[in-house]
Amino acid sequence: MRSYRPVSLNAIWFLIAVNVLIFVVTLVRPDAIYLLGLTPAFFPRQPWTIITNLFVHGSFTHIFCNMISLYFLGSFLIRLVGERKFLVIYFFGGIAGNILYIWLGSPFIPGIGASGAIFALGGTLAIMAPRLPVFVFPIPLPMPLWAAMTLFLIISFFLRGIAWQAHLGGFLLGLVAGRFFKKRSQTYYF
């Protein structure tokens, strides 16, 4: 049984627009990364960066992959939980990832990107719709969403320059959110 709420993707389009705008700003003013990115050693003097870093990306590939993931995971999750809960998961997931990055990341390397928030969306969906089939390039066959999210998380542990701490923190928050919302809503079968 599938249950969808009436959906508005305004929150997703707004997040994408802000991310693209900030990306353009950092292309023009690369030093903005140090003002908006989360550098653990400077966090006590720059507390706003626990949120602003979610809108900063370091390359076209970085923002492209994150915004595509945000659109597909987000548009599905909004249909299941609604816009308000989607935004709660997104921002709390990003903050959880950032807290883990502050604790375990490199103290003087800015953490940037929406990946922690996006992993929170994926973690929530991995609980609420675990068998949802997704395609992962270059694998030609669909795999269950839970397997795809776990694969992406594991891969992030081995790639240089990836803040795996943010991915893990967001994913863990997403799993908790998925359990919370699944218990309070109708069961979804995929």
Image (spheres, rainbow, N blue to C red):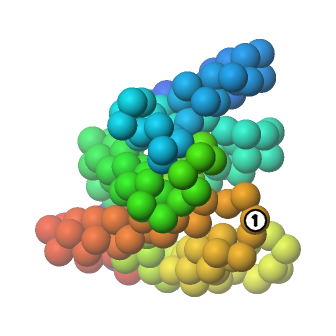
Q: Quadrant of the N terminus?
A: bottom left
Residue nearest the observer in this picture, 172 or 41: 41
Q: State left or right for residue 49 relative to residue 147.
A: left
Q: Quadrant of residue 129?
A: bottom left
- Compare residues 5 and 154 and report the one nearer the observer: 154
Residue at 80% over, 46% down: 61
Q: Residue at x 66, y 70 (%)?
A: 156
Q: Does 101 sit above or below residue 35?
A: below
Q: Which residue is mark 1?
A: 160
Q: Quadrant of residue 8?
A: top left
- In the displayed structure, 171 sits above or below 155; it is above
Q: Quadrant of residue 189?
A: bottom left
Tell me the amino acid under the disc marked 1. Answer: Arg
**Residue 62, position as x, y percentages in the image:** 73, 47
Q: What percent of the width, then of the height, locates residue 94?
A: 42, 50
Can residue 124 be seen here? The reply is no
Circle 1 Cα neighbour tier, 10 Å, few/some/many (<14 / 14–19 / ≥20) = few
Task: Tell me the residue at 28%/65% (across/down).
Answer: 177
Q: Residue at x 75, y 65 (%)?
A: 160
Q: Answer above or below: position of 124 versus 188.
A: above
Q: Nearer the viewer, residue 77 or 119?
A: 119
Residue 190, position in %: x, y? Answer: 45, 79
